[in-house]
Amino acid sequence: MLTTIDKMPMRSRATLSLSSPPSSHFHIAVSILLCWLMMAAIQTDAAEITSSDSAPAILPLTVESDIYNLGPYVSYYEDKNSQLNFNDILLEKASPHWSRQDTDVPSFGYSDATFWLSLDLKNTQTRDTEWLLELRYPVLDYVDVYITEGFHLFQRYSTGDNLSFYSRPFPHRNFIFPIQLQSGQSLKIYLRVQSKTSMQFPLKLYSPSAFQNQNDKANILQGLYYGIMMITALYNLFLYFSIKKSRFLFYVAFICGFSTYQLSISGYAYQYLWPESMEWNSWSLPMFLSITLLFMAMFVSRFLNLPEHKPRTNKLLISVAVLTLFAAFLQTAIGYRFSIRFIILAILFSITLSLILGIQRSLQKDRSAQYFTLAWLSSLLGAFILGFNKFGMIPRNAFTENSLQIGTAIEVVLISFALGEYIAQQRRARALAQMETTRMEILARKAKEEALEAEKKYSARLEVQVNERTSELQNALKQLESANQRLEKQSYVDELTSLFNRRYFNQRYEMEVKRTRRNCTSLSVIMVDIDYFKKLNDTYGHLFGDLCLCHVASILEQGKHRPGDIIARYGGEEFVVLLPSTPLEGGLIVAERIRGLVENTKAPQPTEGPLSTEPKITISLGVATLHPDSTESGAELLQQADEALYQAKESGRNRVCVAPSKTPIDRH
């Protein structure tokens, strides 16, 4: 870059090199960049720490909190073929596939699938409450929300970035859905999301007052950001009119283009500028990104004087920017997803290339190029974090989602320093008398650096201590979670046989009876009893009786028809087998298979009693079926199965009987 220093006599330049130490502005710029780098590292670590926290299945809404981060409570189902509708989800046809992500914000990158999210809420307060559900990612194409209680649909909302802004139930840049819960009421909320953009679901629940406070704070911060961008643009515009250098004008265009892109991606533009222009709204993000990249390339070309020093690199930089503009115009033909990915990769490439060029000029001790390098390093870091975030490689949070915004805010400040340095270089030729002042400034800077270094060491030690305490707390939480899981398992599992107990069977039985009525299918029940169990106990001892119970339990598990069948210890030596969606013929087949396995399997060896005779274990089984057209209740079905079991025992044991028939079915 040509400056007035290049035109000075050799002696004057030698004198200037001694009298022009690094300015305080440069160290402010370095400090800003260091803070930016530390913030990136700290925020990434924080996201990783919070991602391992566990959460209960149902979120209790209490009076102690008015803001909830819903990420840990949300389950998701990826409908890869987009075939399921709301009724399919409500009837739990996809229930085996519900999953959770161990992150505060579920994120899946770019995907053609339709994502279903589910969330359970319970109002534990003694009064009716009102809440606002926020999906803080305003560029999702289609968002459907279903609010249900049991199988009853209370409310449905349909909105999205591809629909009119006025389709939103709440006029806001993000997707806001009002929810009302009565005292003690439990609701289940389903969200259906389909979009060509990155699949990210930052969900939060606010009380109306808390939402208003958060919204006011967010508006203030956004106002500060756009204020900084506008002031910087006006500042460089005034410099252009006074100096008449095109680099200032291109930089103003770059700031304006990027600010407009931020207005679009944050939802402000759709809310206030084009609320009814759905097609333009979908075009705006790639379009403004490509325009911003074009002006950035023109600015870098002029600022680093690339046409003179690096003509081939200059052509490459400009060509990439022009290609992104074509990709934005052709997004309908080539696809939005390909277009936006190409533009993001082009931006990362262009910023990286600009950074390399800036480093090369910085090594030549060009102060304005050093500012430029710091600025582009900040922008590159923000762009990479945003890119990894959009491709689902790092978690989504307020920091990663706004990383490019933060990076460019720092960048415009540092570039303003760089452009200011360009002007200052022309003035330094007349500032030779300030050598002594500059020397004192160097001493003060060194003292400041030493103080910052000491503070940095202290902060590092403190961070290590905090990480150690955090690790201890996480281990304690994991142990507590493991203990809770074991306790819950013990409450539903029989301790001796490891089968489900009667309590679990009763709960599951009621559900299966209702499902059978709803789906018009058959439900078969098999009651099983060990023959002459009391005699075995009296002859060989209670320890052998326990071995017999475990022996029969393991055979029942082998004889299951399907993974969804339920086997439970019903009491004493009695077991029950629940066969959903199984007619009477299937129940008989399963019962006979179980009976044969028990009869033909060698019994455990007793440790006491008469050892000369080997004990023989057999079972009797009663089968009853609830048909689709039957009017019998669940209790009556169990009674029929029990009567069939009694009939099998009365008919000689080691056999299968069917209710309501009184004739035993002998399967010997």
Image (spheres, rainbow, N blue to C red):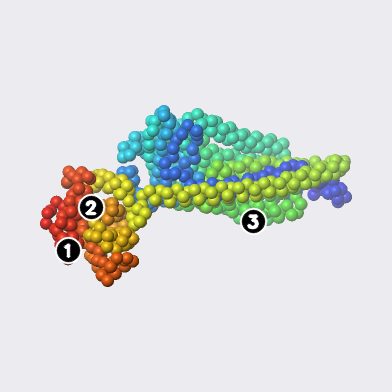
Can residue 324 be seen in the rendering of this structure? no
**Could you say where residue 144 lies in the image, as x and y percent from the top left?**
39, 40
Identify which residue is drawn at 27% across, 71% down. Answer: 612
Q: State left or right for residue 507 relative to residue 52.
A: left
Can residue 128 be seen in the rendering of this structure? yes
Amino acid type, callout 3: Thr
**Could you say where residue 407 lies in the image, as x and y percent from the top left?**
62, 44
Please state which of residues 525 and 412 is positioned toward the viewer in this rendering. 525
**Picture quadrant where residue 593 is located:** bottom left
Cβ–Cβ under 8 Å for marks 1 and 3: no
Secondary structure, mark 2, is: strand
Secondary structure, mark 1, is: loop
Please state which of residues 399 and 113 is positioned toward the viewer in this rendering. 399
Q: State left or right for residue 282 relative to residue 262.
A: left
**Picture quadrant where residue 150 is located:** top left
In the displayed structure, 217 sits above or below 471; it is above
In the displayed structure, 1 sits above or below 420; it is below
Please state which of residues 74 and 414 is positioned toward the viewer in this rendering. 74
Q: State left or right for residue 588 relative to residue 215.
A: left
The residue under label 2 is: 525
Identify which residue is drawn at 72% across, 39% down. Answer: 243
Give me the C-alpha separation between circle 1 and circle 2. 18 Å
Looking at the image, tell me whether mark 1 or mark 3 is earlier in sequence order. 3
Identify which residue is drawn at 40% across, 43% down. Answer: 118
Looking at the image, tell me whether mark 1 or mark 2 is earlier in sequence order. 2
Q: State left or right for residue 633 relative to residue 54.
A: left
Identify which residue is drawn at 64% across, 52% down. Answer: 354
Amino acid type, callout 1: Arg
Assign the C terminus to one quadrant of the image.
Answer: bottom left
Amino acid type, callout 2: Val
Q: Residue 667 shows which numbered tag? A: 1
The residue under label 3 is: 313
